Image (spheres, grey):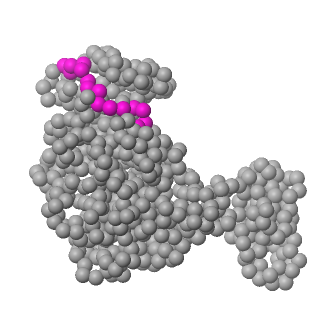
């Protein structure tokens, strides 16, 4: 069984830089014809991801693939890109992916029109659920600088952790949580685990999912235990795609992992945001990037799902960080892998990308069920490279180019230009949404750890997304209206305070800030369900007050409590008559904050809430 390919330069070009590859769905799945695609969107390539319907020969796909491909190739009449000869119908079966799709390899590359015809013909087969080219994804980091400190450099270099304007408020967060007990997967270039500023006891061996020897630089094409970064340098121009440059190894995964879980308070180097997490490095990127099929399998495996040919992950990840991306709308393989991970409870954090375009044009940033992270610089402004759009949830410090220290995000690095034995361990400054995303992933880890330590259930991925969005700090400089990058800058301390608030419990649909009520000012149009909506107001001492609701429809119970969030079993006063008209009176209130819960029984809508005093 063949599971790697020869990597001709022209094929590498196509897969690395032109990934706007929409999936074509079988006619039985959609009433619409395949979307029109310009020839430039289908470059020469040899790999396809095919997902058959579950009720057709799922256990033995080779025969089904042969039949499907034979018929599709004959109908399409496709010719190879290099020789112009008709394609032979002997596609090679490579393996089954963790999402149930099959990866196969054509005997030769196809040009753009030929690939478009072939994909459309395969999709027309009633046995096929979807088909899409397997594409190369790449790291997201546009700038690098290097520094070897003599002393701990937290105060002088790591503005992104402690600065009041551009940072994530780490010092206050560390008073509440350091991430103990949480596993964070870093799906990236691998890691250099021997760096002295990693706590080796908190770094798992991980796994190498790269199945292509050209990309991995390993002699064995099979997947192997361990996630050592072999280097992603390019010794010659144009080897990945036309215009690709000679470049040194990035050691990208080491830097990303260090932002999340670098050793802290150990007297050397720098700090990580969640220093007591357990890091799970997963290698999917190497020379010229990495295949979507490998990354999708890594997502499934990291979350604890089975992947054919790989031992099950004994340490399923609570958080998965993907600081990588490629061109195009979210592929079906990506989305299925993410959905499987989220269904197992893993929070998937994705870098928005560094192309200054809408995230709808980049994958996996255009996928659903993710926490999508844009980037800001040290001044809190949108980073000039950051992707943007309605799909971005919030932003994190990704760095900019305002100086070699102040402008960049500093973490563990390596001086070697090629292999992991070509230099020395040091510290590196980088900029990109790749650097922003791990700040958000680490914050999510702090939250889950703190909730478990407090005897609370961890948040679901959807509720974690809502909490991160709701607790983000407002941008000190608003991004342009046509370049939205989410609700604000991730604030680790605010996220923890909100997550540990009594109002944020398993019964609520989200953990968001309560609405502030002003006496004598009505708040109308309120709707809710059994989770309820929350409000606060400040009362004067001794002056009678009234909290009341009116209008709308449905049933709503009103709970009021002084000094702490109100709950159905923890309140000072309540009103629970049938309907939406409720009133609570406090004859002699104390000065300070009062909390209000308006809970549906089971729902209400169009209700007005008001406090009078």
Task: Specify whether residue 521 is in view.
Answer: no
- Residue at horizontal 22%, vertical 66%? 414
The spot of residue 11 in percent (x, y) is 19, 37
**Residue 331 is covered by the magenta coloring:** no
Q: Is residue 415 left or right of residue 257?
A: left
- Residue at horizontal 44%, vertical 52%? 315
- Residue at horizontal 39%, vertical 77%? 265
In this view, the residue farthest toward the left is: 236
Please identify the quadrant where the C terminus is shown.
Answer: bottom right
Q: Nearer the viewer, residue 441 or 326?
A: 441
Would you identify the image quadrant in which residue 275 lies? bottom left
**Residue 100 is covered by the magenta coloring:** yes
Q: Is residue 46 left or right of residue 175?
A: left
**Residue numbers of the magenta segment:** 86-101
The spot of residue 229 in percent (x, y) is 25, 55
Please identify the quadrant where the N terminus is shown.
Answer: top left
Task: Specify whether residue 281 is in view.
Answer: yes
Would you identify the image quadrant in which residue 168 lies? bottom left
Would you identify the image quadrant in which residue 103 lies? top left
Magenta region, mostly helix, strand or loop? loop
Q: Is residue 324 left or right of residue 487?
A: left
């Amino acid at each position: 069984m063949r599971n790697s390919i020869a990597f001709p330069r022209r094929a590498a070009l196509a897969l690395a830089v032109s990934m706007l590859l929409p999936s074509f769905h079988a006619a039985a799945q959609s009433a619409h014809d395949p979307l029109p695609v310009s020839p430039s969107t289908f470059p020469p390539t040899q790999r396809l991801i095919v997902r058959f319907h579950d009720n057709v020969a799922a256990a033995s796909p080779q025969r089904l693939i042969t039949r499907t491909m034979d018929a599709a190739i004959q109908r399409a009449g496709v010719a190879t890109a290099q020789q112009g000869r008709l394609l032979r119908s002997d596609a090679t079966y490579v393996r089954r992916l963790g999402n149930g799709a099959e990866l196969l390899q054509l005997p030769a590359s196809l040009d753009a029109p030929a690939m478009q015809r072939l994909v459309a013909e395969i999709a027309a087969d009633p046995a096929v659920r979807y088909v899409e080219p397997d594409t190369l994804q790449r790291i997201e980091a546009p700038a690098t600088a290097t520094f070897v400190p003599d002393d701990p450099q937290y105060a002088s270099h790591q503005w992104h952790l402690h600065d009041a304007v551009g940072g994530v408020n780490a010092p206050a967060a560390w008073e509440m949580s350091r991430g103990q007990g949480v596993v964070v997967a870093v799906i990236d270039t691998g890691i250099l685990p021997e760096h002295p500023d990693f706590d080796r006891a908190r770094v798992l061996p991980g796994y190498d999912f790269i199945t292509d020897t050209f990309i991995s630089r390993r002699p064995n094409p099979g997947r192997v235990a361990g996630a050592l970064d072999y280097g992603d340098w390019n010794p010659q121009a144009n080897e990945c795609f036309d215009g690709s440059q000679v470049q040194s190894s990035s050691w990208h995964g080491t830097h990303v992992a260090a932002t999340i879980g670098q050793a802290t308070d150990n007297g050397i180097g720098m700090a990580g945001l969640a220093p007591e997490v357990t890091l799970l490095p997963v290698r999917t990127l190497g020379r010229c990037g990495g295949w979507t099929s490998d990354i999708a399998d890594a997502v499934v495996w990291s979350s604890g799902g089975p992947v054919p040919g790989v031992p099950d992950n004994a340490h399923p990840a609570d958080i998965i960080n993907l600081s990588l991306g490629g061109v195009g709308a979210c592929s079906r393989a990506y989305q299925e892998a993410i959905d499987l991970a989220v269904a197992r409870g893993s929070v998937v954090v994705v870098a928005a990308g560094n192309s200054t375009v809408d995230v709808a044009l980049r994958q996996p940033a255009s996928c659903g069920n993710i926490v999508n992270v844009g980037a800001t610089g040290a001044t809190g402004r949108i980073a000039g490279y950051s992707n943007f759009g309605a799909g971005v949830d919030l932003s994190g410090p990704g760095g900019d180019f305002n100086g070699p220290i102040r402008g960049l995000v500093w973490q563990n690095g390596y001086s070697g230009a090629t292999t992991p034995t070509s230099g020395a361990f040091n510290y590196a400054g980088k900029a990109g949404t790749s650097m922003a995303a791990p700040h958000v992933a680490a914050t999510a880890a702090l939250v889950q750890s703190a909730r478990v330590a407090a005897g609370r259930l961890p948040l679901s991925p959807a509720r974690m997304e809502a909490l991160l969005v709701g607790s983000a700090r407002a941008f000190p400089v608003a991004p342009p209206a046509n370049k939205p990058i989410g609700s604000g800058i991730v604030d680790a301390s605010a996220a923890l305070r909100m997550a540990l608030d009594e109002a944020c419990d398993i019964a609520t649909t989200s953990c968001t800030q309560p609405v502030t009520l002003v006496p004598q000012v009505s708040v109308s149009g309120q709707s809710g369900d059994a989770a309820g909506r929350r409000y606060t107001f400040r009362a004067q001492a001794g002056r009678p007050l009234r909290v009341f609701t009116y209008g709308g429809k449905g049933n709503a119970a009103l709970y009021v409590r002084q000094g702490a969030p109100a709950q159905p079993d923890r309140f000072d006063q309540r009103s629970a008559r049938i309907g939406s008209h409720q009133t609570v009176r406090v004859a002699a209130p104390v000065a300070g904050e009062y909390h209000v819960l308006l809970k549906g029984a089971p729902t209400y809508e169009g209700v007005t809430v008001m406090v009078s005093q």
